[in-house]
Image (cartoon, rainbow, N blue to C red):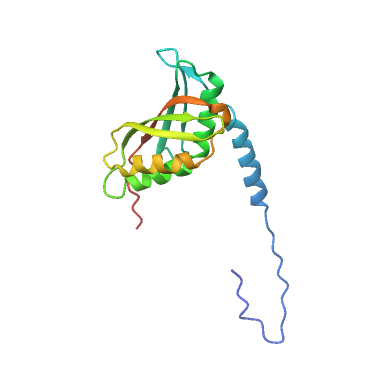
């Protein structure tokens, strides 16, 4: 902060401002992170079905995708990328589930993606105390575009964690 109180009119001052290009650094970091996100690790579960996982950066939402017997690794990877793009929706549904009580729990869904990249969602079971999270997912996830390569029926388990409240003094 510069005090110009000592200057008497008609006075003048030269001010030199120096800026660093933090936006360019942010763009580079984002591009680097996105390049790493394109790689999806697909494994097999104990039944031999393809499986992939994902999570929000803050750890409040995690999801596990398990393909059907006929699913390929590419289909599961495509659904994982689509679900990763839907993380803002998942976080919003978690927030809605936490309005009256803890959102901690899991929601198991059947996700069927057609060739046009449209999804049908059916909740199979939920351990989240509030049904707001399930209703939000079945309402807003089908509105999002899914990769057409994810065509098929998959099981998706979404886990909402309970974050400790942050106290500001």
Q: Position of residue 74 (x, y in %)?
A: 56, 22
| Among the 4 quarters of the image, the one containing residue 139 | top left
- Give the left or right position of residue 22, taking residue 82 as reference: right
Q: Position of residue 100 (x, y in %)?
A: 27, 49
Q: Position of residue 121 (x, y in %)?
A: 41, 34
* Near-viewer residue (166 or 139): 139
Q: Position of residue 85 (x, y in %)?
A: 53, 38
- Give the left or right position of residue 38, taking residue 129 as reference: right
Q: Residue at x 46, y 25 (%)?
A: 153
* Near-viewer residue (117 or 76): 117
Above or below for 155 versus 7: above
Q: Residue at x 42, y 37 (%)?
A: 59
Above or below for 131 versus 147: below
| Among the 4 quarters of the image, the one containing residue 64 | top left
Q: Residue at x 53, y 18 (%)?
A: 72
Q: Quadrant of the N terminus?
A: bottom right
């Amino acid at each position: 902060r510069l005090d110009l109180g000592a200057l008497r009119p008609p006075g003048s001052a030269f001010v030199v401002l120096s800026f660093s290009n933090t936006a360019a650094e942010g763009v580079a970091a984002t591009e680097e992170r996105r390049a790493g996100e394109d790689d999806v690790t697909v494994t097999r579960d104990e039944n031999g079905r393809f499986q992939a996982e994902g999570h929000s950066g803050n750890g409040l939402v995690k999801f596990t995708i398990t393909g059907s017997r006929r699913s390929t690794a590419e289909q599961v990877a495509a659904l994982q990328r689509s679900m990763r793009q839907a993380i803002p929706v998942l976080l919003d549904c978690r927030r809605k589930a936490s309005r009256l009580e803890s959102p901690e729990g899991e929601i198991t869904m059947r996700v069927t993606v057609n060739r046009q990249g449209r999804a049908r969602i059916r909740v199979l079971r939920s351990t989240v105390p509030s049904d707001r999270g399930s209703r939000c997912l079945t309402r807003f996830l089908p509105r999002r575009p899914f990769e057409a390569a994810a065509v098929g029926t998959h099981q998706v388990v979404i886990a909402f964690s309970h974050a400790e409240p942050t106290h500001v003094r």
